[in-house]
Amino acid sequence: MIGLTYFKRFRMEVELGRVLAEPVAPDGYRLIPWRPELLSAHAEAKYHSFRNGIDANVFPCLGENEGCLRLMREISQKEGFLPEATWLAVQDPVAAAPEFCGTIQGIRDRTGMGAIQNLGITPEHRGQGLGRTLMLAALAGFRSVGLRRAYLEVTAQNDSAIRLYRRLGFHKVRTVYKAVEAPSMALR
């Protein structure tokens, strides 16, 4: 039996006029600005970041490699897509091949606000400061094209992400519920 499951999410916003820290990648990592040929690398980082998390339940495409590739194509083709706010994190170990380990995308919405589409860090690279660095790079990208505010939505159960966003100046402006068709899942 298929039913609806509701996921509680927060819309959080930040003013871009205040001075934010410069995005500095942690040692052993670097950020790569958007280029179309990196689309599949963004999709790979997105898939490995979200596939086993709650957001793959909220947005099933995040739990599939092909779904992440489709999503990246859609985001990069949106009218308001902002390459300036879209970044890829890579670990550059000395003796091994670089590993794509984080991604963020930004768009300008119809109201002229910056919208973070996804911020994802692969599990083995969390806790290094990459989420903060990617978010600061995206926010700087929004400011560079003249935007004054930015927002994102986050699943209410994602405590570590909410803490990060609050430390960066985001505040909750509303609670929304995302309905998802799901087989026999409890109401959340």
Image (cartoon, helix red, strand yellow):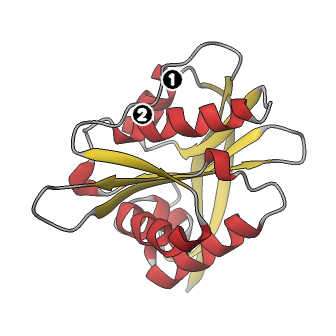
User: Residue 66 location, x and y as percent?
Assistant: 51, 84
Residue 67 visible here: yes
User: Residue 6 location, x and y as percent?
Assistant: 60, 58
Does 184 sit left or right of 14 as displayed?
left
Q: Nearer the viewer, residue 125 or 1?
A: 125
User: Residue 79 location, x and y as percent?
Assistant: 84, 61
Q: Which residue is mark 1?
A: 168
Image quadrant in which you'd find residue 54: bottom left
Q: Label 1 amino acid? A: Leu
Q: Which residue is mark 2?
A: 132
Q: In this rendering, is residue 33 above or below 156? A: below
Question: Which residue of the protein is positioned furthest toward the right in this rendering?
Answer: 111
Q: Which numbered disc, 2 or 1, marks the residue that appears first in the sequence? A: 2
Residue 174 visible here: no
Does 121 sit left or right of 169 as displayed?
left
Image quadrant in which you'd find residue 20: top right
Q: In this rendering, is residue 101 above or below 36? A: above
Mark 1 Cα-neighbour bin, 10 Å: few <14, some 14–19, many ≥20: some
Question: Which residue of the protein is positioned furthest toward the left in this rendering?
Answer: 95
Q: Label 2 amino acid? A: Arg
Callout 2 touching callout 1 (CB < 8 Å): yes
**Residue depicted at x 74% and y 40%:** 114
User: Residue 142 location, x and y as percent?
Assistant: 70, 36
**Residue depicted at x 32% and y 35%:** 129
Image quadrant in which you'd find residue 74: bottom right
- In three-dimensional space, the C-alpha distance between marks 2 and 1, rounded to whole angstroms, equals 8 Å
